[in-house]
């Protein structure tokens, strides 16, 4: 839900001022989001400030550290704590410490049945789009231990920019996508029955603190869109944004020692190939918290 008092509501006249402030001095290149850090586990004050400044503007920042090919899961955990991220989402396939090791599953079954654990492309999505509203994912971190021999490029788009692009095309798109039942994830079944109940909700909503939150997947299977002319038009317009050549879409690959800190921006990943000397491995931490100070 987006309350009328928010500049993000289609009927609120404060929107142009919010839009102009958002777009002022917006990053033009992926490199503008990058901060060199020595050790993400213990940022200096200037490193933290530089990352937070980028997150405040673009909802995301990248870092490059000296920890190349260091397999230490304390990296995302300690980095997250420095940004007020404490409530980890222990999702279905996360490790016991709730931080997920993303790498190609050696054998089919369980993890191998899920695209993040294969080398196939991942379509545009926000993390945890299937979670219940009270357990929405507001932030996530990625840390690269090793990269693939080829491929594995990420696409990133600030969800506030996606909102602006849709609203500038037609405010009716926002009205359609803020509906409480516009997107439904059907129940997930297992051998015991319903493992996860169906979950309906909006694409665009605001958090209690007022910031925009987005819930989306470009998957065509295991998703049900509300069947109205307005919703179909809005979804088509959103797909066109993600599949287009907008200068606001940043593309690049995380190399060893690099990472992403973000307020759950929409993202995608190209397919990749591991080689004898390189097997892609990243750590991912998902949070119910939003990055503090952003």
Image (cartoon, helix red, strand yellow):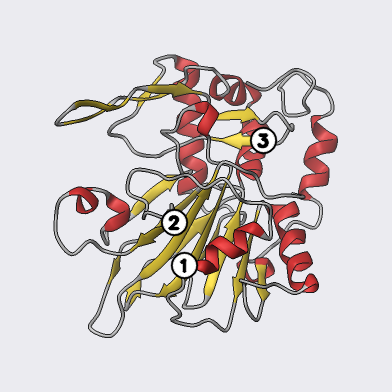
Instruction: Answer above or below: position of 34 versus 264.
Output: below
Q: Would you call the spot at circle 3 few (<14 residues within 10 Å), some (14-19), or many (20 or more)? A: some
Give left or right: position of 205 versus 106: right
Mark 1 secondary-structure assignment: loop
Image: 4 above or below 32: above
The Cα–Cα distance between marks 3 and 2, rounded to whole angstroms, is 25 Å
Percent position of residue 217, x then y = 42, 38
Q: Say few, some or many: other residues with alpha carbon within 10 Å of mark 2 (under 14 / 14 to 19 / 20 or more).
A: many
Q: Which residue is mark 1?
A: 73
Task: Judge from the rendering whether residue 110 lies leftward or rightward of residue 80; answer left or right.
Answer: left
Please give the name of the residue rendered at 31% of the width and 24% of the height, measured from the top-left corner: 186
Q: Do callouts 2 and 1 mark residues in contact (Cβ within 8 Å)?
A: yes
Alpha carbon separation for disc pair 2 and 1? 7 Å
The residue furthest front is: 96
- Please say if the residues under marks 1 and 3 sit with CB atoms less than 8 Å apart: no
Q: Residue at x 53, y 73 (%)?
A: 258
Q: Which residue is mark 2?
A: 99
- Residue 287 in the image: state x and y as whole percent: 55, 46
Taking the spot 65% from the left edge, 81% from the top edge, the residue there is 38
Q: CA distance from mark 1 to mark 3?
A: 30 Å
Observer-nearest of 265 and 109 = 109
Q: Nearer the viewer, mark 1 or mark 3?
A: 1
Residue situated in front as seen by the camera: 188 or 162: 188
Q: Nearer the viewer, mark 3 or mark 2?
A: 2
Q: List x then y, in percent, for residue 116.
A: 32, 54
Does dot 2 land on a helix, a strand or a loop? loop
Which quadrant is home to the N terminus? top right
The residue pinned by badge 3 equals 212
Left or right of 207: which side holds 225?
A: left
Q: Residue at x 84, y 28 (%)?
A: 14
Earlier in the chain: of badge 1 and badge 3, it is 1
Q: Earlier in the sequence, mark 2 or mark 1?
A: 1
């Amino acid at each position: 839900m987006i309350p009328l008092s928010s500049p993000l509501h289609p009927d609120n006249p404060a929107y142009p001022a919010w839009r102009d402030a958002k777009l002022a001095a917006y990053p033009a290149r992926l490199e503008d989001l990058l901060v060199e850090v020595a050790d993400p586990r213990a940022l200096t004050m200037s490193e933290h400030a530089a990352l937070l400044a980028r997150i405040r503007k673009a909802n995301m920042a990248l870092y490059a550290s000296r920890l190349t090919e260091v397999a230490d899961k304390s990296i995302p955990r300690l980095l997250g704590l420095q940004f007020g991220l404490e409530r980890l989402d222990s999702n279905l396939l996360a490790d016991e410490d709730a931080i997920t090791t993303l790498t190609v599953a050696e054998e089919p079954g369980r993890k191998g049945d899920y695209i993040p654990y294969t080398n196939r492309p991942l379509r545009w999505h926000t993390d945890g789009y299937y979670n219940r509203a009270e357990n929405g994912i507001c932030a996530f971190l990625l840390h690269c231990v090793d990269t693939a021999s080829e491929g594995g490029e990420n696409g990133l788009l600030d969800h506030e920019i996606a909102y602006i692009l849709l609203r500038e095309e037609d405010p009716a798109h926002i009205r359609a996508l803020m509906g409480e039942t516009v997107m439904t994830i059907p129940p997930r079944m297992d051998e015991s029955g319903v493992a996860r109940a169906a979950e309906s909700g909006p694409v665009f909503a605001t958090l209690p603190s007022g910031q925009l939150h987005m819930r989306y997947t470009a998957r065509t299977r295991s998703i049900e869109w509300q069947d109205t002319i307005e919703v179909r038009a809005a979804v088509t317009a959103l797909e066109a944004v993600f599949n287009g050549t907008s200068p606001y879409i940043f593309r690049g690959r995380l190399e060893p020692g690099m990472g992403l800190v973000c307020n759950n921006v929409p993202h995608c990943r190209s397919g990749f190939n591991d080689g004898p000397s390189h097997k892609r491995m990243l750590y991912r931490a998902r949070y119910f918290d939003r990055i503090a100070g952003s």
